[in-house]
Image (cartoon, rainbow, N blue to C red):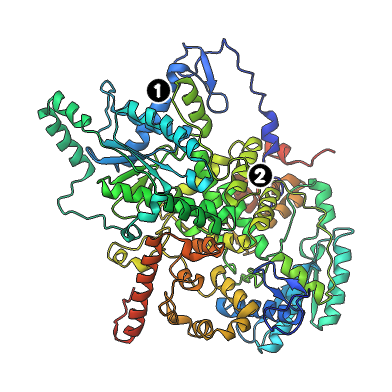
Amino acid sequence: MCQVEEDYNGLECKQEKIPVPTLSRKCMKCKEGTAVLIIRVSDAFCRSCFKEYFIHKFRAMLGKNRVIFPQEKVLLAVSGGAASCSMLAQVQEGLSRDAPKRLRFMPGIIYIDDGGACGRSSEERQRSVDQLKSIFTETGFPYFIVPLEQVFSLPTSVLVPGTSDPDPSNPSYKQAVDQYIKEKQNLTEEEAASAVAQLRIEESVCSPEHKLALERLFSSLNTLTAKEDMLHTLRQHLILHVARENGYSKVMMGDSCSRLAVKLLSNIALGRGAALASDTGFSDPRYGDVVIVRPMRDYSSKEIAAYSRMFHVPSVFISGLDTKTHDKASIQRLTESFVTNLQADFPSTVSTIYRTSEKLHTVMPSQGQTTEPASKCLLCLCALDTNVDKASAFHATLVSEQLSQIKLQDTSHDARHCAEGQGCGSGGCCSSNRSPEHQDLKTLLCYSCRLTVKDMGAVDALPPYIITEAEKRQKRSRMKMEISEFLLEDED
Amino acid sequence: MPVQCSNCVQRRAVLKRPKTGHSLCKDCFFWAFEEEIHQTIVSAGLFNRGETVAIGASGGKDSTVLAHVMKVLNERYDYGLNLLLLSVDEGITGYRDDSLETVKRNQQQYELPLKIVSYEELYGWTMDAIVKQVGLKNNCTFCGHNADDVAETVLMNVLRGDIARLRRCTAISTASEGEGAIPRCKPLKYAYEKEIVLYAYFKKLDYFSTECIYSPNAYRGHARAFLKDLESIRPSSIIDVIHSGETLSVKDGVKMPVQGTCSRCGYISSQALCKSCVLLEGLNRGLPKLGIGKHHRLHGKILAQEPLTEQEEKLLKAVDF
C-alpha cells in the first residue's frame, strides 16, 4: 500500500537519452518527409503525416463510438479556445466535399458568452463576439451566440431530463447508414447545397436587468471554486436549452484529454465521484433527449496546439474566471496546475488519469425511473448520490454538523423537527410558503452541488427557473409525504 | 471578544473544528469527536459483542487516540469488547524503541493488556537488518488510517490508474474471505488528522510524533501535498474526496485482479505469495531484492522450493554501497 518510489529507476537509467531532434530527421511513418514535430517519446512526424494522423483520430473516435447518426443535428459547443476551434475545423474538414469518407451529420455552432460572470466589459465582449462571428460565418454553419444573462429567462423545463424517446422504428446504426446512402443517391447536388444555404443565425441580446442579476448571482458566491462550478452548470443549461429548442440531439464538446484529466481529478476533489463517468467519458446521456459527446478526448493539449499552429486554425483568446489568478485560487485551478506540474516530471500522468475515466461507469437509473425528476440533482441533473448507506462519508458529515451545532437550532423549531424526523424526505416537512432557504434547497441537490450552494450568500440570487422548479419539487415531495402510507413501495 | 461554543452556547469556544468550521468548547469537541467515532462503529457494524479487538499500537497519534477513544466508548456504550494493545517491534533503532516506550506508558494509563511482537520473533529479521540488506526502499509497513490517509490513497490510486485499489481503498474494513484471516478496520476513517491532533492535544495524550525514518516517499508525497492544498482552499475537501471514492463505480467489463490469499501464510494477497513472504524468502535466500519490485513469475519457483537460475540470482543480489 505504501510503497516507496514506485518508479523503476533501474529501467529508466538504461534508456538512452533521446537524441535532440535535428532538421535532417525523417518522418517515422512515411520515412520520406522531413520530421517537423515529435508526438510521443521519439515518434517524429512530418507535416502531412501529422495532418493525416490528426484527422484520422477524429474520425476514428466518432467511428468507434457510433452514436452520431446520419443527418442528425449536432451542436458544436465552441468557446473560442484552441481545442473547441480545432474540433470545429475537424468537423468542417470531415464535411468537405472531397473528404473520402464524409461525415454525414448536420452541424450548428453555439457560443456562450460568459463575460458577464467574468467581469469583462461590454466592449471586450463585443470584440470577442465579432472575432468569433467571422470564424463562424466562414464555416457556413448556422450559429447561436448566447450571452450567459439568458439564464434569467430560461424555462423550468431545462431542469427536467427528457426521455430519449425509444422509437420502436428506431433503426440500428448500420441500418440508418445504409438507408441514408440509398436516399443520398436520389438527392441531387443542388438540393444538398440549398439545404446548407438555409442558415439560421441567432444572436440574442441581454437586458440590463439580467446583467445586474447575473452580477448579483456571482457576487453572492463566496469562493472561486463555487463560481466556477456554478458557471459550468449554467452554461450547460443554456446549451441544453438551445439544443432542445432547435432540435439538436447531440452536443459536441471540445474537451481534450489533458482537460479531462484535470476535470476528473478536480471533480473527485469536489465530491462528484458518482457522476465521474458521465462527466469525463465519451458520451454523457444524463439529459435524456440531448446527449453530450466529447470527440476530442484522445488529443493532448500539445497536439492540438501544434495542429492549430501548423495549419492555422483560428481561435480567440477570451479570459475566463480563473485567468490571472494564483494557483490556490480555486480547487479547479489548483488541480490544473498540479496536473500540469506533475505531467512535466512524470509524462504519463495525464494519460494515466484519463484512462482511469474509461474504466468507470455511472449507475444510471433505468428509463422508467427517470420520469421522476426528483431523483435527479436540481442543478447538475446527475442521479442523486445522497441516498447512500449510513456508514458513509456523507452521513459522517451530517453527524459532525449536527453534533457541532444542533442545540443552537433549537430556537427555530422547524429545523429541529427536521433533524428528528430524518425521513421527512426531500423538500423538508417543515418549510411552508417561503422562498427556498439553504436547508430546503439542499435536499434537492447532489453532494457536490450542495457544497456549491453552501458557499452561496443569498439563495434567492439564483435564476427564477431554478427557484420555481425547486418550489415545485418541494411541493410534490410534501404531497408524497402526506400520502406516503398509501403508496406501494417499489421493491427495487 | 471570546467566541461562544456553538454547541452548548455557554462555555467559551477554544477551537474551530477543521471538519465543519464550527467553534466549540473543549468538552463539546471531545463529545462530538467520540460520538462520531461511535456512529462510524455502529453504522458500519464493525464489532460484535464479546469479540477480542487488537488495537495496533505504534505509539503514533492515530493509535494513541484510537486506543483512548475505544476504551472510552467501550465503557460508555458497553460494547462488551475485549480490547488489547498490539505492538510490532520492527527493530528500527531510534524510532521503534522510542515509540515503544510511549506504547508502554499508554498501556499503564489505559490499563489495557499489551502484547509486543518483534519482527525477530515473527520472521527472524529486524527492520534494521533488512534495510542493511535491501537499501532504503519499499519497507513502510503500516500507515495510519484517518480521513486524510484514505483521501490521499484515493487521489494516489487515481494518479496511478490503479482501479482495483481505488475501489478497495475506501472500504472501512478488509473483507476477510480467506479462512482465519483477521479483518482490519479503520474506525478513524472519517476523523480528520488535524482533529486527532487537537483531541490528543487537549486530552494531553502522550504520543510519539517522529516521522518514520524509513518513509521518504515520492509519489504519495505529491498526493499528500495536493490534498493539503485542497484542504486549505475548502476544508471539507478531505471528506469530499472520500465521498467521491465511495460513490464511483467501476465498469463491469474492466478486468479486475482477484483478491486471494497467500498460499504460504494465508494473509490477503493478490499474488500466490504475499509481499512479506516474498521479502522473507528473498532475505533467507540471500537475494534481498526479490521482495522489491515485481517478480511474480518467480513465485512458482519459490513455492516449489526450486533454485533460481544464475542470471535471476544476479539481478536480485544485494546492492553494493
Residue at the (38%, 71%) spot, across then down: A471
Check disc 1: other Cα within 10 Å, few if <14, some if 14-19, many if 20+: few
Residue A285: mark: none
Image quarter for residue B122?
bottom right
Label 2 or label 1, whichever comes before in sequence order: 1
Q: Of helix, strand and loop, which one carries label 2? A: loop
Left or right: A213 as drawn, with respect to A16: left
Residue at mark 2: A326
Front-most of B9 and B197? B9
The picture places residue B161, in percent across and down from the top left corner, at 55, 48
Residue B72, percent from left and from top: 73, 84
Closer to us: A90 or A323? A323
Residue displayed at 71% across by 81% down: B28
Residue type pointed to by label 1: Glu
Is B219 on the left-hand or right-hand side of A33?
Answer: right
Residue A277 in view, yes or no? no
- The crowd level at tag 2 (other Cα within 10 Å; few <14, some 14-19, many 20+) is few
Q: Which numbered disc covers residue A52? A: 1
Looking at this view, is B196 or A246 the one in front? Answer: A246
Q: Is residue A489 left or right of residue A29?
A: left
Say which residue appears at 66% left-offset and 58% top-offset. B231
